[in-house]
Image (cartoon, rainbow, N blue to C red):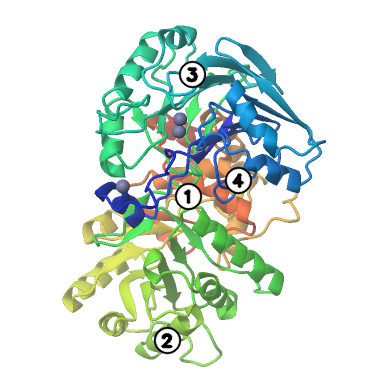
Amino acid sequence: MEVALLGTGAADGWPNPWCSCASCTDARRRGEQRRPTSALVDGVLLLDLAPGVPPAGHSLERVHTVLVTHAHPDHCSPFALLWRHWARLPAPLMVVGPAAVLDECRPWLASGDPVVLTEVRPGQSLECGGYRVRVLAADHEVPTVLYDVTGPGGDRLLYATDTGPLPAATVEATRGAQYDLVLLEQTFGDVHDHGTSHLDLATFPDQLARLRAAGAVTAATDVIAVHLSHHNPPAAELDRRLADHGARTVLDGTTLVTRGRTGGPPPRRLRLRSRSVEFRRLGRSGLNISEIAYGNWLTHGGQVEEDAAFACVQAALDAGITTFDTADVYAGTRAEAVLGRALEGRRRSSYELFTKVYWPTGKGRNDRGLSRKHIIESCHASLDRLKTDYVDLYQAHRYDTTVPLEETMTAFADLVRAGKVLYIGVSEWNAEQIAAGAALARELNVALISNQPQYSMLWRVIEPEVVPTSEKEGLSQIVWSPLAQGVLTGKYLPGEQPPADSRGGHAEAGTSMRGFLREDILTAVQGLRPIADDLGLSMAQLAIAWVLQNPNVGAAIIGATRPEQVHDNVKAAGVRLEDGVLQRIDEVLGDVVERDPTKTARG
Ligand SMILES: [Zn+2]
Ligand SMILES: [Zn+2]
Ligand SMILES: [Zn+2]
């Protein structure tokens, strides 16, 4: 099942819009807003009819059943039924709940609406379009039920919000359930004298202990605290304390995926968090970057491609990506202009902008390389196109053997002191060049904090020399082509012509693309598919997660031609691959992996 948390907050959300307590202030500072609790299962089964509209990217269009717990307005806002009428959806909708819920709904139905109201009581079961729903008792101020939902694949969810300590009959009813996912309310945090039928940080762990004792919650159960209010401690402390009890919180809009139990590999729980891109420090600096960075390059820069790039930047921002990488040379400078337009109007401190200099941007002798003249001029041109006063990271796109390194590094240092560039980095430099650059940067008192190499399961040439040197000198790798030009998505099959709609991706990587399209490589890559399947990942997600296992990697750059690709790739964030998995990958790929350090910058 895919369970989207449309809301995880109490009636008043968190922060409470009227409040400025420490907990509300912290949530606002983080830009987090929780809505009243509700969840959407596989897009078709809606748990609670919360007020307001779902978070961005979630639609109720396919919902055929609404399971409402009780008639309190944060769970039962039947105005939404009138919205459905306005959308003129002809498909039938079943609304399930205690009698009082149905009474609330009736006035909002127009005659002829294809809505069926179904009253339920604790102890009943019903079948809703392939889902088995058991109705359990709650302890709340008004008649309230909890829902135990088993999906078509056999995976199982407990939705338990708006209840005090669980009635004994409810715990008994869950005996042996081995839920994949439990959404359990925890409204009041450290306020214990609330005198209401809700849980708090004192009573929540007790309920989990009871569910564990009954075999309903196991080590494999993902337990999410919902119905959170501002009576809770700030998020970081709350997460720490919930972790002690094997529970956690997720942000609104998060989608959790459980796997079916019928057929296929053993049940597994996988956490796909749609807004949980994690952050890493870049090199030995204070700069935080998103571990998935969006790489804005274009192949030709035509209008269709520019529109797609624009949409992908929006998708990246929606997905929680804050780090954007481009270069003066991409699509003859048009990539920077598109990125500048896409980011225009956003708070400048809310994202990190990286660009590069080296490759020719014009026909003149000085329109290329790492001379002082070209670095300064190209930087100004980039700032114009990007519509910003500074870039966060300015990178030497290659090493320039024709210019003294001192000249290059001094020009970079001057840009830093002029405030046009905050940090400096390099791309595809070898270990020796990185060490020399780092030594000069130290002398000039500026921070050289990153290298941008090609890196993937198939192309590991940085591992023997570049990575150890970078660790010593305080640089991280921002890696490009984690999918090896798309070969690691598995879409190129051995013995077949490449799909017509596939593209080489990175503008300067045409030769390595051909290099990866070898029969032995394509055959080995197909061996990764069962590994990805076992983990519930796509092959692309596995490949991106793989590069992020290297602690010297600050970010994996992803590119996209469609917004869905961004959302798909982002799901690799935060995935931890166990040693056994890494070993299986190495065994499957065998000697098609390139590890020769002298091939740096020759990919
Ligand atoms: Zn409530
Ligand atoms: Zn507050
Ligand atoms: Zn309530």
Q: Given this view, does label 3 or label 1 mark the residue nearer the observer?
A: 3
Q: Residue at x 64, y 27 (%)?
A: 102
Quadrant position of ligand 3: top left
Q: Which residue is mark 1?
A: 456
Q: Which numbered disc, 2 or 1, marks the residue that appears first in the sequence?
A: 2
- SS type, badge 4: loop
Q: Given this view, does label 4 or label 2 mark the residue nearer the observer?
A: 4
Q: Which residue is mark 2?
A: 380
Q: Residue at x 60, y 67 (%)?
A: 310
Q: Position of residue 468 (x, y in %)?
A: 28, 53
Q: Given this view, does label 2 or label 3 mark the residue nearer the observer?
A: 3
Residue type at mark 1 is: Ser
Q: Which numbered disc, 3 or 1, marks the residue that appears first in the sequence?
A: 3
- SS type, badge 2: helix
Q: Which residue is mark 3?
A: 179
Q: Which numbered disc, 2 or 3, marks the residue that appears first in the sequence?
A: 3
Q: Which numbered disc, 3 or 4, marks the residue that appears first in the sequence?
A: 4
Q: Nearer the viewer, residue 142 or 150?
A: 142
Q: Position of residue 603 (x, y in %)?
A: 50, 60
Q: Do the residues bearing badges 2 and 3 touch, measured as CB atoms within 8 Å?
A: no
Residue type at mark 3 is: Tyr
At label 3, counting other C-alpha atoms closer than 10 Å, the crowd grade (few under 14, some 14-19, many 20 or more) is many
Mark 1 to mark 4: distance in Å? 33 Å
Tally of numbered tags: 4
Mark 3 lies within 8 Å of ligand 1 (Cβ measured): no
Q: Which residue is mark 4?
A: 58
Q: Position of residue 578 (x, y in %)?
A: 39, 32
Q: Which numbered disc, 4 or 2, marks the residue that appears first in the sequence?
A: 4
